Amino acid sequence: MIDSNRLMEIVKSGESLDREFKSDRRMINDREIYEEIVAFANTSGGVLLIGVEDDGTITGAKPRHDKTTDPLKLQSAIFNNTVPNINTRISLVPTENGIVLAIEVDQYPEPCATTEGKSLHRTIKADGQPQTVPFYPRDQRSRRVDLGLLDFSAQTMEDVSFGNLDPLEFERLRQTIVRLRGDRSLLELSNEEIAKALRLVESKDGKLVPNVAGLLLLGKEDVLRDKIPTHAVHFQVFDDQSNVRVNDVFRYPLIRLLFEVESRFSARIEEDEVSVGFYRVPIPDYSRDGFREAVNNAVLHRDYTRMDAVYVQWYPDHITITSPGGLPPGITIDNILVHEPKSKNPLLAESFKRIGIIEQTGRGVDKIFMGQLRYGRPPPDYGRSDITGVRVILKGGEASKRFAAFVYDSDRQGHRLTLEELILLNILYLDQRIDLISAQKAMQTDFAEAQSILEALRSNGLIVANEKGDQQIYELSLEMQKKLGLPVAPARLDGFDRIRQEELVLDYTSAHGKITRGEVVQLLGISDTKARRVLERMRAENKLKQEGKPPRWVYYVSTK
């Protein structure tokens, strides 16, 4: 239930898709309440606050049942005046300016309406403000796709025959299977047998009728444009002033379309190089695998019932890829790495896997992340995604040659870094420090797993930890800082304890073979006297051994 503290948090956040404020100065009627509840249920759920103005001013709600408002009566009225019957949670929240009536509702797994037959949902206007609008059948179909209740790609097409599939696309499909090492058992089949094996057609009255997936993969361009007008991919290039320099629109069958997009990507991509031993390692502006998977995901998991297109927008310092429709139910930007794969178009996804366009595991998101992280760039950003579209931003700009060299060298030596390890090392490379809670959130894993990964990196000498208050703070070891070309900042004890001092000294000694008192002064940012005490303590504890000729040529080496 909502209390006064929670109420003030909601009011402060303002109106949005899942928050609506209603003035009750003239007492809104029950019908309007039912309609707003239906709209929330048809979107992503939310809370209706009655007695709050649009600007967040609390003016109070009028009593609805004689001199008071009975939450159970209102809850029952909403339940009995909606189809299917909608359950709500109702709170009466006292404030200095009167009672606020708060009605909470969850997202429903099927389209809802009032008993009068009125169906609505929530959308965002052009000015960024929310609104409640009619929920038309086309929107309801799109909603069922979003909820995973309808596989639009499996729907058969009216007035379409097998003759509307292009023989050239069948040949392109075979060539793609060979190139991408797909299901080679398909290669020996006839066109009709391939279509049946991939379930791209259905038999009706003795004839083969293509479904949406079949037309998207193999349809003739003019038929595809006519029957699935929502199918389009825009490839746009912008200059520094956001002027459009390239604006190509593709409505080809999917295999050809993906080839055309990748060809334009390859024509624009530039590469640098870094030396790792005897090898020259290429460092592209953007990962080819990461870009390919992002585009594959955009066309595969989009909502083809929406009158929108896929956009690939290339800016001077990043690429934004937009796919119509929100994330599948249960998947959010906070669990996208760990949630099991879900497709809005299961039949189309199955075909993609057998052809070889995507992996059988369906973990394309991992490749998108790996493509960014292995070059020392920020991870993909899904933060602009909403119910209208999934948007992923791939940051470009200058990569870290040393970070890329380190990752490549680790792979070459058989110590392939996991995605979780790359996430943590990338954060430490860019932000210097991380705590356990932040690490857990970044890896989208549980507490124990996050701690285990951090400790593994620590035992391998890649990171070090120190106590700061009741937290452990992790950062790159001195050896890693040097390897990645980072400036080694002096550790001025703002939270650094004795253990941390000794770790830094030992890390430096391990990396350079020895350490002097002057180097300890610079490393720890302490006085010469304190540096002498640190070294004497470590020597007494048999962690360091003194060598060289005193007093001028003394240095220390590790006893390990």
Image (cartoon, helix red, strand yellow):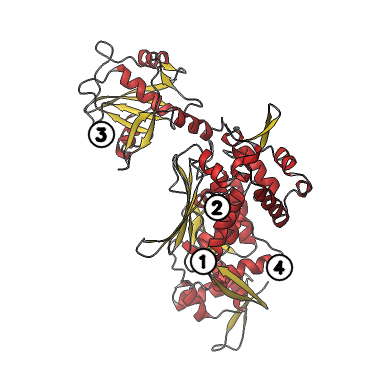
Q: Earlier in the sequence, mark 2 or mark 4?
A: 2
At horizontal 51% and vertical 35% (from top left) the residue drawn is 146
Cα–Cα span, label 1 and label 4: 32 Å
Kindly indicate whether the residue at mark 2 contacts the one at mark 1 (C-beta within 8 angstroms).
no
Mark 3 sits on what residue?
Answer: 54
Q: CA distance from mark 2 to mark 3?
A: 39 Å
Where's the C terminus, which quadrant?
A: bottom right
Label 4 SS: loop
Q: CA distance from mark 2 to mark 4?
A: 29 Å
Q: Nearer the viewer, residue 157 or 406?
A: 157
The amino acid pointed to by label 1 is: Arg
Given this view, does label 3 or label 4 mark the residue nearer the observer? 3
Q: Earlier in the sequence, mark 1 or mark 3?
A: 3
Disc on the earlier residue, 1 or 4? 1
Residue located beneath label 1 in the image: 268
The amino acid at mark 2 is: Ala
Say which mark, if any, is on residue 413: 4
Q: Which residue is mark 2?
A: 294
Up-down relation of residue 536 to residue 460 (above or below): below
Q: Is residue 1 visible?
A: no
Q: CA distance from mark 3 to mark 4?
A: 61 Å
Secondary element type, mark 1: helix
Residue depicted at x 46% and y 71%: 489
Closer to the camera in the image, 322 or 178: 178
Instruction: Categorize mark 1 by other alpha carbons within 10 Å: few (<14), some (14-19), many (20+).
Output: few
Kind of residue indicated by mark 4 = Gln
Measured Cα–Cα span from mark 1 to mark 3: 48 Å
